[in-house]
Amino acid sequence: MHPVVNQVIEDVGAQLSACSDYQGHVREQLQPVIVSVVRFLARCLDAQQGGERSHTQYLFDPQAVEGDLQQDLVGWLHAMGPYGFTIEAQHIGGGRIDLMFTFDGFRFVMELKREQGDATQSGLSGYLRQAGAYQVADVALGMLVVLDTTPDPLAAHIRDNVWVDRLAAVEPGGTDRYFAVVRVPGNRKSPARL
């Protein structure tokens, strides 16, 4: 694997280690999902604008929607992983989630969003409350993947498009919830047009 991509994956694992649930078989089973999504981001960052039939064309479309990201990511996950997941799973934390991975003894929730306004780390932290609501009866770990379609999307390095965020416990001494956050730059232009 590319050393920079590997470093990003290691950094995410190290930061998630602050969560007591991220150990043992939970860590072992989640690691391939994290690897797949970071590799997906790397592929998206390297993607060149193609024709209408290109599966990455949405990355260059300012009108791209969350469903475009979901379709591409689901296709990638089907091709890359042996894990089972459910799309649009119902009755999880009182709602419907975008992707739910089912493992031996626990489930892992991935929330997908499109951001048109503020795609900074602090701006995207506003989605953590919704994503955290899906974790109320399982491991306190999740993933948030956001398609950035802001007017001038951040041309950030891959290291700056992946981080771990934390939703503080409701009460002192309670359970904090942790999220691997992946920002996928959309509304892109070819380098020659920058």
Image (spheres, rainbow, N blue to C red):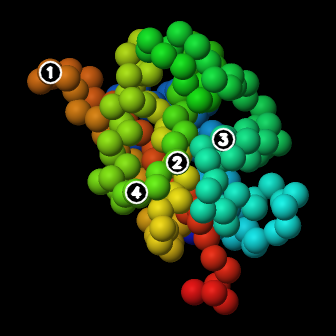
Instruction: Tell me if label 3 and label 4 are in contact, CB under 8 Å.
Output: no
> Which image quarter holds the C terminus?
bottom right
Give the amino acid at mark 3: Gly
Above or below — where is 145 with respect to 53? above
Circle 3 is placed at which residue position? 67
On screen, residue 126 versus residue 51, left or right, reads: left
Sequence-earlier tag: 4 or 1: 4
Q: Residue at x 61, y 29 (%)?
A: 99
Circle 2 is placed at which residue position? 114
Q: Residue at x 79, y 42 (%)?
A: 75
Sequence-earlier tag: 1 or 2: 2
Query: How far is the residue under mark 3 from the one under mark 2?
Result: 9 Å
Give the amino acid at mark 1: Glu
Query: How far is the residue under mark 1 from the one under mark 3?
Result: 35 Å
Q: Quadrant of residue 78?
A: top right
Sequence-earlier tag: 3 or 2: 3
Circle 4 is placed at which residue position? 117
Residue 84 percent coordinates (x, y)? 73, 24
Sequence-earlier tag: 3 or 4: 3
| 19, 135: nearer the viewer | 135
Which element type, helix, strand or loop, lies under badge 1? loop
Query: How far is the residue under mark 4 from the one under mark 2?
Result: 9 Å
Residue 31 percent coordinates (x, y)? 59, 40
> Which image quarter holds the N terminus?
bottom right
Q: Residue at x 44, y 65 (%)?
A: 160
| 62, 113: nearer the viewer | 62
Q: Residue furthest left?
A: 172
Task: Classify 10 Å Cα crowding around label 3: few (below 14), some (14-19), many (20 and above).
Answer: few
Instruction: Tell me if label 4 and label 1 are in contact, CB under 8 Å.
Output: no
Circle 1 is placed at which residue position? 171
